Image (tube, rainbow, N blue to C red):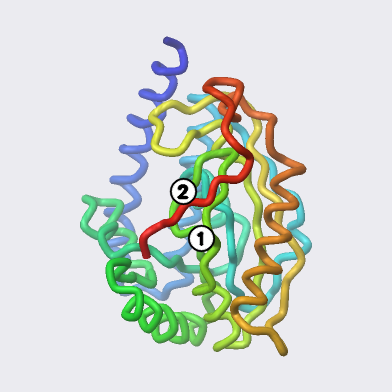
């Protein structure tokens, strides 16, 4: 019961934070992106602080020294909204690859639209690849890094989706370093769950992988190998790890995610 109460408290507070920051971003839409991104950082910081106060979920980040000073492609494991907020705080100017339907959400979607996301049509794989390359080049020219979730969607703790090569192909086409990122947030904030549990989620940032002489597929394999090896190190500590709250699930389950 306490977990439900804390989770309701978090959702109420985050709704207020989201509405206030969304309005501020829309009002500031004509300001330079660097100034608007400060509002995004303020939003992420407020949400994470409220998450800690209401639900007792803290976070730690390892490997900050691996963050490049130049624009890069960030390939991040995706288990919850926690890493989206944390990435905003610890990486320089950035934008995100997202499904276009997100901009239809009241307030959150409107604010996202104002932040130059790369919006793709996942129902059309060819069109999505073209959008990623064209819009990605524009964002990099503006000095932005690009966050890509290579598995395409949130994947439950203890499971593993199929890594797609879109982000790595973008890095190859634009000659950008790839920064792999591992997280175990789904062990405290389960996929598609309203409940948030107390504890300490971990994010680990890996050394940059440079595209010279490598194909998108090779880069994807290198990033996947690093991320999944790091996942084996940081996983199994939270209350929502398979086997602690539900029947034991295989460590690796191949999930086909629609583009």
Query: Residue 14: which disc?
Result: none
Residue 92 rendering spot, x and y as whole percentages:
59, 67
Residue 6 in percent (x, y) is at 44, 20
**Res 227 quadrant in image:** bottom right
Give the residue pinned by disc 1. 149
Residue at (55, 88) in percent of width and height: 173
Within 10 Å of the Cα at label 1, are there few (<14), some (14-19), or many (20+) other Cα atoms? many
Crowd tier of the residue under label 2, counting other residues whose Cα lies within 10 Å: few below 14, some 14–19, many 20 or above: many
User: Looking at this view, is 6 or 19 the one in front?
Assistant: 6
Q: Earlier in the sequence, mark 2 or mark 1?
A: 1
Q: Is residue 42 above or below residue 133?
A: above
- Seen at 74% across and 50% down, the residue is 230
- The residues bearing labels 2 and 1 have C-alpha atoms spaced at a distance of 8 Å
- Quarter of image, res 195: top left
Instruction: Please indicate whether residue 68 sits to the left or right of residue 123 in the image.
Output: right
Q: Are marks 2 and 1 in contact (CB under 8 Å)?
A: yes
Q: Residue at x 40, y 18 (%)?
A: 4
Helix, strand or loop for disc 2: loop
- From the top left corner, tell me how far across and down residue 143 is, in percent: 54, 80
Figure quadrant of the C terminus: bottom left
Q: Does residue 175 sit above or below 92 in this rendering?
A: below
178 and 14: which one is in front? 178
**In the image, residue 15 above or below residue 227:** above
Q: Residue furthest top?
A: 1
Q: Which residue does the numbered mark 2 point to in the structure image?
A: 154
Q: Residue drawn 49% across and 46% down? A: 155
Where residue 41 appears, x then y in whole percent?
50, 55
Of residues 213 and 72, the one drawn nearer to the viewer in this rendering: 213
Local SS, label 1? loop
């Amino acid at each position: 019961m306490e977990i439900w109460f804390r989770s309701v408290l978090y959702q109420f507070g985050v709704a207020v934070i989201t509405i206030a920051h969304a309005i501020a971003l829309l009002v500031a839409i004509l300001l330079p992106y660097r100034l608007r991104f400060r509002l995004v950082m303020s939003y992420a910081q407020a949400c994470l602080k409220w998450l800690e106060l209401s639900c007792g979920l803290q976070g730690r980040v390892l490997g900050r020294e691996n963050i490049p000073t130049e624009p890069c492609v960030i390939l991040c494991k995706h288990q919850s909204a926690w890493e989206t907020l944390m990435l905003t705080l610890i990486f320089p100017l950035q934008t995100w690859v997202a499904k276009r339907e997100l901009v239809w959400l009241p307030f959150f979607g409107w604010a996202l639209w104002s932040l130059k996301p790369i919006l793709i049509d996942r129902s059309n794989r060819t069109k999505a690849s073209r959008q990623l390359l064209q819009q990605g080049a524009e964002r990099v020219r503006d000095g932005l890094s690009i966050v890509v979730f290579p598995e395409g969607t949130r994947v439950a703790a203890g499971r593993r989706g199929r890594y797609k090569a879109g982000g790595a192909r973008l890095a190859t086409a634009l000659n950008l370093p790839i920064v792999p990122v591992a997280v175990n947030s789904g062990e405290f904030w389960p996929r598609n769950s309203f409940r948030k549990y107390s504890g300490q989620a971990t994010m680990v940032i890996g050394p940059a992988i440079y595209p010279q002489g490598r194909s998108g597929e090779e880069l994807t394999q290198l990033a996947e190998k690093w991320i999944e090896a790091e996942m084996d190190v940081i996983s199994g500590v939270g209350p929502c790890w398979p086997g602690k709250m539900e029947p034991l699930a295989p460590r690796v389950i191949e999930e086909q995610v629609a583009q």
